[in-house]
């Protein structure tokens, strides 16, 4: 049998280009978006999209025109006419910026030009480079639908004496006719919003504040939509800059490497005279790594570059809006359609982050879980601004940095994108907590009903009313029974919540214990060591089991409860390299309390310290330490004091014990709230003593919390 091997090449059909245009570009809006980005890469200060007779496919035209550098005949034939060229990608890799506005190119796949096919069948491109003739390209896309090979369909390209770009002018003009869609009012309004969002409104505001009056100074890029008919279709589209004025809360953040700086401002409306403005400047804050999902947050190492964030956050409650917003419905509709956190690279939007169907930060789910404390997309207008660091050397072969998807809808889900997500979520968490402080102040200032203990105070008021009416004999026993049953139910749920927060600790501790015992059995035949580890594990589980057993208020020794909490968290502390120090110099004491709730509370406070020591200090502080000891320095009773040498608290005590208040990016914000409720239920209190209020070794200069057993323990 003869070897008849042949060397052949692919023969692409012409319709492949049509498929690329349809598959890579989702809708006409994205198609226009791509053409606008091309103008940005061409170093143009602006771009104008003019639409004429667009309700009629045959008569309608779309013209996209810029005043950028333009192209000469060689660039058109050797770059523009080569689909998939890496021309722009190589420019980025070399760090090559445009001469006038010093931009790095956004395009990198060489397929954005197929956006024109999504808009119409007949294309005429006119372009001119400085000191060169105009170049004209004419394409009839209908010819590509025939069963011909790509090299069988000629494209008409010719040079001519300038007729459009006269004198020293340069640029590119794309005329699109034989439209593929009848454009409706809704489509045009969506396109107008997309064009308005192409450039970050925050960049424009920043430039105005810095009094950069020319585009050459501020590198501003503007995009404009013009309708030759039906101009009324664009009426009522709110200007973003005007909407930003209605935001009660705003913040700007800078993320470099693994650190965060932010400026936060609460700006009450002039009519909100019952509450004062507040400004916070956070200089340097270490962001936590996402160890659960193994995400390294270092945005420089991941070749993302420094990140700038702007957040404008709103309060949509009718009573609050009435104090400062004339068109309340218009603002709500604008936020419903345009709210969210968008991404801008080099000042130009990366589609389609922040669109209604792309909740890339998962804000909606967080809002559903905790509706009063989290911020959904229709409460924020935000921008993530990415600017290439001049020190970053791009290497596409290593899949580093943020890489746009071929279909132009966002970034590839690689390590860099996950780092970007986590960094933004981490920063947004801090701003959310600042906003929640002021939200609480607003609630207290403008909510006529005072905050009270749920149910119990209502029952007390009801009982007083019953006594006034002389009905205590008939109704009093029922009210007493309701109150007693509610307190019992509350205590049971409080127990469940407290032990539930300890579940992750239980899993960690038992898991580590089983692993250590397994290693001992495998490596060590010395039975005393194995028995010791097995006994330790059994006692550990017994200690955890005691947390879920029913028990009332009993007399308990503080030292015994501290020792049990320490024992229950011993292995986890060891894994994280944290030393726990106990101190009973002020003596032991006996209190009447719920043993399981107190131990669970101590474990949760230890767990909280572990998280902050591990995520904020990391490896930068070699000796991570936690302190637990007894104290008799409080006027209202003995106390157990827990302290660490971590970063300390950033918020006032009355705020920290509110439910769902957390500065952890994935935190529920229930730990301190439940600890506070546990101590209240035991006629004690959760205290946050200042330095000097309690005797502590000087090294414990971080967070300090005290369980003060007052009332019947005096």
Image (spheres, helix red, strand yellow):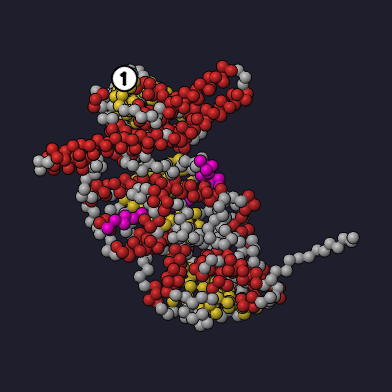
Q: Quadrant of residue 657?
A: top left
Residue under the point 60% across and 65% down: 111
Residue assigned mark 1 = 589
Residue under the point 45% across and 40% down: 286
In terms of secondary structure, where does tag 1 sit?
loop
- Decide if residue 533 is on the left or right side of residue 683: right
Which residue range is magenta in the image? 292-318
The picture places residue 297, in percent across and down from the top left corner, at 51, 44
The picture places residue 302, in percent across and down from the top left corner, at 55, 47
Mark 1 residue crowding within 10 angstroms, few (<14) / some (14–19) / many (20+): some
- For the C terminus, give its image quadrant: top left
Where is 272 relative to 540, above or below? below
The picture places residue 399, in percent across and down from the top left corner, at 61, 51
- Residue extending farthest to the right is 1
Residue situated in front as seen by the camera: 671 or 232 = 671
- For the N terminus, give its image quadrant: bottom right
Where is 608 relative to 383, above or below? above
């Amino acid at each position: 049998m003869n070897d008849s091997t042949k060397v052949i090449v692919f023969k692409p059909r012409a319709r492949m280009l049509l498929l690329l245009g349809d598959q890579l570009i989702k809708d006409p809006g994205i198609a226009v978006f791509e053409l606008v980005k091309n103008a940005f890469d061409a170093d143009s200060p602006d771009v104008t999209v003019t639409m004429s007779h667009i309700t009629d496919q045959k008569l309608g035209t779309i013209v996209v025109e810029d005043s950028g550098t333009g192209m000469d005949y060689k660039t058109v034939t050797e770059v523009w006419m080569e689909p998939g060229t890496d021309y722009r990608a190589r420019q980025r890799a070399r760090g090559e910026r445009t001469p006038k506005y010093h931009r790095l190119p956004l395009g990198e796949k060489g397929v954005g030009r197929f956006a024109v096919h999504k808009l119409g069948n007949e294309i005429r491109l006119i372009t001119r480079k400085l000191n060169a003739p105009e170049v004209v390209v004419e394409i009839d896309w209908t010819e590509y639908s025939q069963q011909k090979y790509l090299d069988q369909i000629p494209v008409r390209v010719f040079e001519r004496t300038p007729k459009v770009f006269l004198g020293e002018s340069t640029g590119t003009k794309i005329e699109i006719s034989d439209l593929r869609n009848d454009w409706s009012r809704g489509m045009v309004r969506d396109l107008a919003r997309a064009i308005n969002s192409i450039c970050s409104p925050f960049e424009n505001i920043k430039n105005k504040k810095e009094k950069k009056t020319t585009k050459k100074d501020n590198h501003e890029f503007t995009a404009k939509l013009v309708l030759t008919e039906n101009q009324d279709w664009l009426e009522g589209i709110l200007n973003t800059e005007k909407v930003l004025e209605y935001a009660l809360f705003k913040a700007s953040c800078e993320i470099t490497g693994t650190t965060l700086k932010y400026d936060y401002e609460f700006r009450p409306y002039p009519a909100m005279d019952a509450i004062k403005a507040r400004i916070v400047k956070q200089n340097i804050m270490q962001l936590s790594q996402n160890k659960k999902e193994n995400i390294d947050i270092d945005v420089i190492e991941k070749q993302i570059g420094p990140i700038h964030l702007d957040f404008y956050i709103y309060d949509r409650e009718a009573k609050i809006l009435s104090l400062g917003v004339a068109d309340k419905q218009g603002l709500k509709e604008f936020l419903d359609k345009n709210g969210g956190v968008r991404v801008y690279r080099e000042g130009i939007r990366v589609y389609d982050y922040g669109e209604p169907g792309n909740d890339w930060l998962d804000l909606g789910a967080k809002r559903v879980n905790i509706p009063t404390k989290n911020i959904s997309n229709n409460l924020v207008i935000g921008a993530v601004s990415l600017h290439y660091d001049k020190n970053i050397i791009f290497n596409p072969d290593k899949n580093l940095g943020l890489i746009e998807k071929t279909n132009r809808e966002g970034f590839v889900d690689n390590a860099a994108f996950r780092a970007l997500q986590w960094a933004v979520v981490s920063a947004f968490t801090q701003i959310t907590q600042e906003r929640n402080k002021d939200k609480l102040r607003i609630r207290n200032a403008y909510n006529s009903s005072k905050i009270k203990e749920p149910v119990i105070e209502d029952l007390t008021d009801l009982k007083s009313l019953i006594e006034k009416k002389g009905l205590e004999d008939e109704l009093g026993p029922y009210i007493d029974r309701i109150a007693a049953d509610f307190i019992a139910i509350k205590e049971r749920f409080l127990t469940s919540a407290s032990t539930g927060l300890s579940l992750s600790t239980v899993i960690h501790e038992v898991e580590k214990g089983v692993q250590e015992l397994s290693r001992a059995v495998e490596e060590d035949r010395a039975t005393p060591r194995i028995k010791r580890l097995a006994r330790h594990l059994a006692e550990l589980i017994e200690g955890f089991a005691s947390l879920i057993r029913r028990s009332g208020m009993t007399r308990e020794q503080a030292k015994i409860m501290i020792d049990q909490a320490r024992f229950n968290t011993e292995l986890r502390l060891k894994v994280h390299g944290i030393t726990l120090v106990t101190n009973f110099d002020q003596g032991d004491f006996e209190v009447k309390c719920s043993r399981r709730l107190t131990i669970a509370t101590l474990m949760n406070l230890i767990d909280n310290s572990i998280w902050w020591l591990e995520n904020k200090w990391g490896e930068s502080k070699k000796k991570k330490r936690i302190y637990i000891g007894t104290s008799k320095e409080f006027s209202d009773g003995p106390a157990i004091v827990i302290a660490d040498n971590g970063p300390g608290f950033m918020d006032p005590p009355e705020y920290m014990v509110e439910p769902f208040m957390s500065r952890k990016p994935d935190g529920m914000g229930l730990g301190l709230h439940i600890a506070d409720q546990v101590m209240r239920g035991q006629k004690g209190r959760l205290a946050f003593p200042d330095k000097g209020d309690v005797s502590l070794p000087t090294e414990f200069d971080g967070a300090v919390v005290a369980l003060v057993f007052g009332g019947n323990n005096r």
